[in-house]
Every structure is written in C-alpha cells, then in structure tokens.
Image: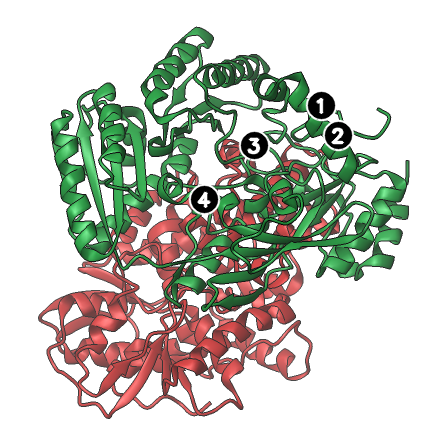
Chain colours: A red, B green
C-alpha cells in the first residue's frame, strides 16, 4: 500500500466542493464537518503531512471515525481515493503507536487461519464470554465453515464452468450457511467448485486498520494459491473480499513484488457469486414459497458494475418471491466491517435509519451480500418482528435460514 | 482579545457544549469553503434555533468578535471563509421544512434545509421550486438566500431572490426580525427580505425563509445542438428567446468544456465543434413539443450542424448530470479551480467569450468557458494552484480584467455566486463611490460593530464598523 506521503498530490487535488457532505453516513448523524471527507483530508494534510498540527488523540479519533464505506469516493467529482488515504493515515498512526492487542490477535492469528487459528477463534469465544473484548464481538461458528467441507477437492457436478471458491471470514466464522448455499447452487448448476486449502483472510480488515504488513502477507498467500488453479473464475460471496481481491490487493504490494503478476491474474478473475449466477443463468429453478424480500446494497460495490443488480436478476427466476424496493438501498447500515465494535453508539444511530426503512417495506426477508451488514442488521432487528437477513444465495438455495 | 479557552467556556454557557467546537483538529474542517483561502476560526458553534443564534450574536457583538455564518461551505466566492479569530456559525442543524402550503403555494423552511431535499419534497406534491444551484445535493436554502444563488433554470425562472417572500433573521444585537409571509403581493415598508437576500451574512443571520412555489411543469424535453462556430450559437440563443420558445435551461459549452466532460462522463459529443447548446423546454406536453420543434429549427437556421433530442427522461437526465459534472471534471485537470461568475446581457456573450480568451492569453493562464448563456451568466473556470504565488498573481489579474470587461459590456460582477472576498476589491467599479457609500450606511445600520462576516462584499479587512 502506498505510503501517506505518496497521496500528497491527491489530497491537494481535492476541489473542496464538499459534495461529500451529502454522501457520508457519519455526517448525516453528527452534522459536524470534521466527520466528512473534505474535513478529514484537510486534517490528514495538516496533522500527518505538513505536521502543522500535532498528531493528537483527537486526530486519531477523527481519522478512525470513518466507516471506509466509500460512498464519498463513489460520488467524488474529483475522484479522490478518500478510503485509500484514510487507510494510509491509519497506517501512519500505526507506525507511530503500534497496533492494539485485540487487533493483533484478530489480524495476525484468527484471520490467518493457520494451524492454531481454531484455538485462537476459540480463545475469542472465551474472551467474549467474559466480556474481555471491546464492543460486541459476534459469536463465531464452531467449527468454522472451512472445517465443515472437504477442501481442495473438486466437487461433483461440473460441466458448465470450473471455479475456485474464495471463502471469506464472514462465511467461515459467522455464516457457514452462506457457504453451504453457494456450494449447493453451484453444484446444481453444473459448476465444478474448488475450495483451495490454506486460503486465508483477504486482508481487508488488516488494511482497514492500517496494518499493511499483515494485509500484504494475506494477499501474497491467497494470490499464490488462487493463481495456481486452472479455473474460469474466482468466486466470492462477500463484497468486501471481492473489493480486496479485485481492486485493492495489487496496491498493497510494492510495485516490484514478485507476487504482483499472480495478484493481477486473480483480480481479473474475481466475481461476486450472485453476479456470477446471474450472468450464467440458472439451470434448475428452485421451487419457492410466496415471499417478499428487500435488498440492502453493500457499500463495497464499486468493484463490479453488475453486482448491485444481480440479486434482482436472480430473484426474478423465483416465481413466488417478490422484491420490494428499499428506500436509499445503497445507504450504509453502520456496520463498516468492525466500525460498529469501536463506535457502537454511532453505528447504532446509522443503523436505526436503515432498520426503519427496512421495516417500512413490510418485507419478510432482507438480502445482502455482505456478512458484516447481515450480522449487524440481524442484531438490530432482534425483537422487532421475525425478519431474517440472509445472503441472496441462501434464498436461491432454498435453504432455511438458521435460527438466530 | 479573549482567550480560546475563555471563548469556549463562554460559548458553552450559551449552547450545549457538544455543539461548540474549539479544538484545532475540528476547526480545520471549517477553515474554508470551495475557494482557496484557508483561515482557522477561533470556534465553531452549531446553533439549533434562532434563540441560540441570537445568544451567540449578542455575545459576539458585545465583545466585537467577528461572526461568519456558514451553510454547506460550498460557495465559490468565498463568502463562508472564516476570518482570524472568528466564530463560525454552522447553520446546518436548523434543517426542518416547517410547512409546505399547497393552497397558497408557499413553503416555510429553516435555513439549513438542503436545496436538493427541498426540491424532492415539493416535487412529490406536484409543486416546483426552480432555483437549481449545481451544488444542490449539499447547499442549503439559507446559503442560497445569502448569495442569491441560481442555476441553469435562471433563464426562465430567475434565481433565489425571485422566490423569497419573507425571512426571519437574527441581527447582530440579538434581536430577531420577521419580514413578509405568505402574501404574494406586499407593498409595505422597506423590503427587508430583499436587503437580506444576497447580503452574504454581512447584515445578520437568516434563520427561516418563506418561499414562493410554482406548479411542477408536466413535461420537459432536452436538446443538444452542435455548432461549428461560437457566434452562430450565440445568435441562435437570442433567436430562440426572441421567438418565445421559453427554454427552461439554455447552457453553452465550449470545446474545452466538452472535452472535459467527455473524459469524465462520455456523452458521445463531437470533439471538433466550437460550441454546444444544451437546451431544455418545459410546460404542458403540447407546448413542449411545439417549443422543441421550434428550437431545433432555429438552431439549424443559425448554422447548427446537428441537433439531438433526448430519447427519454433517462437520456435527458444523463445530459444534465454531465453538465453538472463540468466543474468537478475541470477540477480533476486543474490543481485548483476558481469559478468566475461574470454576467453580461445575453447579446454580449460572444464579445465576453472572446474577451476572456484574450485575457487568458495576456496573463498566460488557462480559462475554460461555459455558462448559463441564456441569461448571459458565464462561468469562466480559471486554473490555479494555491502553492504557486506567481501563478496566483496572474490569476488575480485575470479575474480583475474579467470583472472590468463584464462591467464594460453592461454586465455585473456576479450573476449567482455573490461577491465574497474574491470580488470585494471590485465592488466600487460596479456601483461607483456613491452607490458603495449608501451600501456602507446600510451595513452600519444593521451591524454597527462590524462583526458580521468581515472582509466579505467589503474589501480587505474593512468591516464597516461604526466610526472606522
């Protein structure tokens, strides 16, 4: 990942139009301009580049008060890569202050899924039980998805295509049902699936916290594994993993890194699973009961233009299922990866708007391709009716969503 | 001079402490608007109602602390740029639409309501609020009133000033005045609403606005006409208006502007033409059809080599959003961009465009010209770079020459952005010593201590303070 210094020109290029004001979910809640991209860029410039303002605790607070949802980036008239700049600023702060221990545990042990990862995950479960972790860490699947399915092997039912399935941490640790649904739908549609052994976290969480070294290591490991496979596509059920594999991974490595060719090869093949299915068409149309669903669009969507419309396209095959439009479907739900853990009150305020919009639709189910959104919305909807939040693949597979 | 901690303590006695910012880290976000100058204020206050606004103003007035009202901080003339030691009043918290009255076709809004949001609210009721500054996704109605903001629809519908029926405003001494209301006619006393409209926060703080609404035109159609020559396009503009086609928007883009847009949002426009007219007609469907045909015919008669009519609403929306993207697209190419706002009578547009080209050459600066040609409001975009003082000097010179030229052609310094600090040095060129003297007396009547937005409209550090 580029050093903050290398973004100096880009920060300077910000036209200061302040159009990001309309796009920032954090600003929408606190109405303070230091929460918005323009203000944050000016702060980063002064405190971490020009060093005319000391890098105080408030500087850190403001730099961390960003969901990295990329809504401002997607709407930025000047095309400033605000999220990259915020990550680089966090990296800068990390260099100065070092990572916190929960982050170290998470990025360097659990998400690496190395031998011992399961015990690390179990450790998280224990620490969580005794309230020793900050915020509300979600319960982890035991065993994780990767231990439930035979890895490495090609699965039966090939013919139409051959894909590698990149299993994100969301599916592995939180929602194994998404993984099961992906395998079922691909299998029923004559797609041969390889689940590469020893794949690790995509590196996005580490990157978001400015831990560039951990991110680079993850990128190298995954690229080495995925590039060596003879497959038509690398599919992922997680929009943030896809964003990482497709758009961000190459930037994590130095320009002369020997892995770069592999990273770019993988980037070119990465497809979000719903979009993959929508493009391929379904062989077997599953029977479906009458159901109304609404679609919450994940923030990390810009890496693939067809991703946003894909759920609607696949749902149109299900005779009984009706899609009810959500107001501002692309507005962030407040989860922001792990943002909701460190900014719980703010996250809940952002989520509340989303929950109200969801409830207004009267839908019986919410679909979204992001496991963090799924978790956070599910938590928010507890005690407010029987709405379930699932990945579109779960719906398509006709699997019952697990009882929460 | 009061200390920052003293100021913070005093302000938090007036307003909830969560709505007072005094840490430098936060103030950096308020150091500028969309213009290059950056000055850290001493504090930012986010009042929730006119009473809090009054309390802060009264306090500042007693201590002669400058106050800078702020909407979205998206202004292009520098009206919301803080000055040394000032209190910035961020007015975006007062963001309620109080009332939309369908029978009287009026609305009452707080100053912080975002213009684009107001558009969707009134349009969902079949009503129409025409002023359409291109920053409408963020800019506030209060900011629009303060700058008399307008946009492409100005050619048919005028600008913000034509819709303000009344205001509620807080004066520097803390008194709250109300002027006007739902009466469309009003011939009673001095028009205080008009005086405050366009005063750029130099007289008081507008906290509430009563606005006039129209009915939403049932149909609209968009055309793009391609001209090999600038002059013929300008003749077409005058002819279209003279023929009574009544376009609701009539924009001109130069070749440079089209290059700029095409590299950002490709519309597939030819790159070898000198001028493009983007035209919208609106009204009842049969009138739209007739005006559209008439407009196209006039364009051809004046040498257009191609006229495209948008196939559907989506294509039309694409064309206008590309037009809106011009400022940002240009901003991608220039380091910093200063958008000029000189406005001339529509027949003088070709003369003005040529003068701008000469000014650019003479001062060795890059200037892209586009604008709301139907009302003579040009937006020369001057490429600047804050870090290059020598270039900034030439940019300043070019701006001054553009101002002079516009006035020479019977135009005005600003069509819709305001004077701010960027054009304050030229004020007297437009109004003469007598005109400026009268304005100064008005300023003193409202703001005897000269605390309101010093350095805006009035040149340099001049505050208009009594006795100075």
Q: Point out the tag, 3 or 4, that comes first from the N-terminus.
A: 3
Picture quarter with the N terminus of chain B: top right
User: Which chain letter matches label 2?
Assistant: B
**Residue under mark 4: which chain is it in?**
B
Q: Which residue is mark 4?
A: B133
Quarter of the view holding residue B253: top left
| Label 2 secondary element | helix
Residue B191: x, y in percent? 63, 44
Q: Is residue B247 visible?
A: yes
Q: Secondary structure at mark 3?
A: loop
Image height of A307 relative to A391, above or below: above
Q: Residues within 10 Å of mark 3 (few under 14, many from 20)?
A: many
Q: Residue at x 37, y 41 (%)?
A: B152
Residue shown at the point (64%, 59%) measured from the top left: B94
| Sequence-first tag of 4 and 2 | 4
> Which numbered circle lies on residue B441?
2
* Relative to A324, residue A91 above or below: above
Cβ–Cβ below 8 Å for labels 4 and 2? no
Q: CA distance from mark 4 to mark 2?
A: 31 Å
Quickly name the residue at label 1: B437
Identify the subunit bearing mark 3. B
Q: Which mark is residue B77?
A: 3
Question: Share a chain, discs 4 and 2?
Answer: yes
Q: Are marks 1 and 2 in contact (CB under 8 Å)?
A: yes
- Residue at mark 1 to residue at mark 2: CA–CA distance: 6 Å
Q: Secondary structure at mark 1?
A: helix
CA gap between label 2 and label 3 equals 23 Å
Q: Are marks 3 and 4 on the same chain?
A: yes
Give the percent coordinates (x, y) of residue B303: 14, 24
Q: At x 10% / y 69%, what residue is drawn?
A: A160
Q: Is residue A319 left or right of residue A338?
A: left
Task: Rate crowding at label 1 as few (under 14), some (14 to 19) or many (20 or more) other CA atoms within 10 Å.
Answer: few
């Amino acid at each position: 990942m580029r050093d903050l210094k290398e973004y100096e020109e880009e920060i300077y290029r910000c036209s200061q139009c302040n159009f990001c004001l309309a796009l920032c979910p954090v600003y929408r809640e606190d109405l303070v301009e230091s929460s918005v991209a323009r203000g944050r860029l000016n702060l980063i410039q002064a405190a971490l580049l020009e060093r005319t303002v000391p890098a105080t605790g408030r500087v850190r607070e403001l730099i961390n008060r960003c969901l990295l949802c990329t809504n401002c980036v997607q709407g930025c008239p000047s095309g400033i890569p605000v999220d990259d700049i915020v990550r680089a600023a966090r990296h800068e702060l990390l260099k100065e202050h070092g990572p916190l221990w929960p982050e170290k545990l998470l990025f360097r042990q659990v998400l690496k899924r190395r031998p011992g990862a399961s015990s690390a995950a179990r450790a998280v479960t224990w620490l969580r039980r005794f309230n020793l972790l900050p915020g509300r860490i979600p319960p982890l699947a035991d065993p994780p998805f990767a231990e439930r399915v035979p890895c490495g092997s090609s699965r039966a039912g090939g013919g139409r295509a051959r894909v590698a399935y990149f299993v994100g941490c969301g599916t592995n640790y939180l929602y194994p049902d998404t993984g099961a649904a992906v395998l079922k739908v691909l299998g029923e549609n004559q797609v041969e699936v390889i689940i590469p052994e020893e794949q690790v976290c995509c590196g996005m969480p580490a990157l978001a916290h400015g831990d560039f070294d951990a991110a680079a290591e993850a990128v190298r490991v995954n690229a080495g594994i995925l590039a060596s496979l003879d497959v038509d596509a690398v599919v992922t059920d997680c929009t943030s993993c896809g964003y990482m594999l497709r758009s961000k991974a190459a930037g994590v490595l130095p320009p002369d890194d020997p892995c770069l060719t592999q990273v770019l090869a993988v980037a070119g093949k990465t497809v979000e699973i719903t979009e993959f299915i929508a493009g391929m068409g379904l062989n077997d149309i599953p029977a479906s009961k009458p159901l109304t669903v609404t679609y919450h669009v994940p923030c990390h969507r810009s890496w693939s233009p067809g991703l946003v419309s894909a759920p609607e396209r696949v749902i149109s095959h299900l005779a009984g299922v009706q899609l009810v439009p959500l107001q501002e479907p692309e507005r962030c739900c407040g989860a922001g990866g792990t943002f909701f853990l460190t900014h719980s009150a703010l996250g809940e305020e952002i989520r509340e708007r989303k929950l109200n919009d969801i409830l207004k639709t009267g839908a019986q189910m919410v679909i979204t391709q992001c496991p963090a959104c799924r978790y956070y919305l599910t938590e928010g909807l507890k005690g407010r009716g029987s709405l379930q939040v699932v990945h579109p693949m779960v719906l398509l597979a006709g699997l019952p969503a697990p009882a929460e | 001079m009061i200390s920052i901690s003293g100021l913070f303590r005093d302000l938090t006695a007036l307003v909830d402490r969560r709505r007072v910012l005094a840490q430098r880290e936060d103030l950096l976000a308020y150091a500028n608007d969309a213009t290059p100058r950056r000055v850290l204020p001493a504090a930012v206050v986010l009042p929730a109602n006119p009473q809090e606004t009054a309390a802060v103003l009264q306090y500042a007035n007693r201590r002669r602390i400058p106050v800078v009202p702020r909407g979205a901080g998206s202004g292009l003339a520098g009206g919301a740029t803080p000055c040394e030691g000032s209190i910035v009043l961020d007015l975006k918290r007062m963001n309620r639409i109080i009332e939309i009255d369908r029978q009287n076709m009026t609305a009452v809004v707080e100053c912080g309501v975002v213009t684009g949001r107001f558009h969707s609210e009134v349009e969902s009721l079949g009503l129409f609020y025409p002023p359409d500054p291109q920053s409408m996704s963020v800019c506030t109605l209060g900011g629009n009133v303060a700058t008399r903001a307008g946009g492409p629809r100005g050619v048919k519908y005028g600008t913000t000033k034509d819709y303000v029926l009344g205001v509620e405003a807080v004066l520097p001494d803390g008194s709250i005045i109300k002027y006007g209301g739902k009466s469309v006619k009003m011939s009673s006393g001095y028009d205080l609403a008009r005086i405050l409209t366009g005063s750029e926060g130099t007289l008081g703080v507008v906290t509430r606005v009563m606005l006039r609404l129209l009915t939403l035109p049932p149909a609209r159609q968009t055309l793009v006409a391609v001209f090999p020559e600038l002059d013929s396009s300008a003749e077409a503009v005058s002819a279209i208006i003279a023929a009574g086609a009544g376009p609701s928007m009539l924009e001109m883009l130069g070749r440079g502007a089209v290059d700029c847009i095409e590299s950002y949002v490709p519309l597939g426009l030819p790159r070898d033409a000198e001028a493009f007219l983007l035209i919208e007609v609106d009204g009842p469907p049969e009138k739209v059809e007739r005006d559209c045909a008439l407009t196209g015919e006039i364009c051809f008669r004046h040498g257009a080599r191609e006229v495209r009519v948008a196939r559907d609403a989506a294509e039309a929306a694409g064309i206008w959003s590309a037009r809106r993207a011009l400022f940002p697209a240009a901003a991608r190419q220039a380091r910093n961009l200063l958008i000029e706002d000189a406005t001339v009578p529509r027949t003088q547009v070709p003369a003005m465009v040529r003068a701008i080209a000469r000014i650019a050459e003479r001062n060795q600066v890059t200037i892209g010209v586009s604008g709301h040609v139907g009302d003579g409001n040009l937006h020369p975009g001057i490429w600047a770079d804050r870090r290059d003082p020598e270039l900034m000097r030439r940019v300043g010179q070019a701006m001054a020459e553009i101002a002079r030229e516009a006035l020479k052609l019977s135009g005005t310094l600003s069509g819709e952005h305001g004077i701010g600090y960027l054009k304050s040095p030229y004020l007297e060129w437009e109004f003469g010593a007598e005109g400026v003297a009268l304005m100064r007396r008005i300023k003193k009547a409202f703001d005897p201590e000269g605390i309101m937005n010093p350095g805006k409209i009035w040149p340099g550090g001049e505050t208009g303070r009594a006795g100075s």
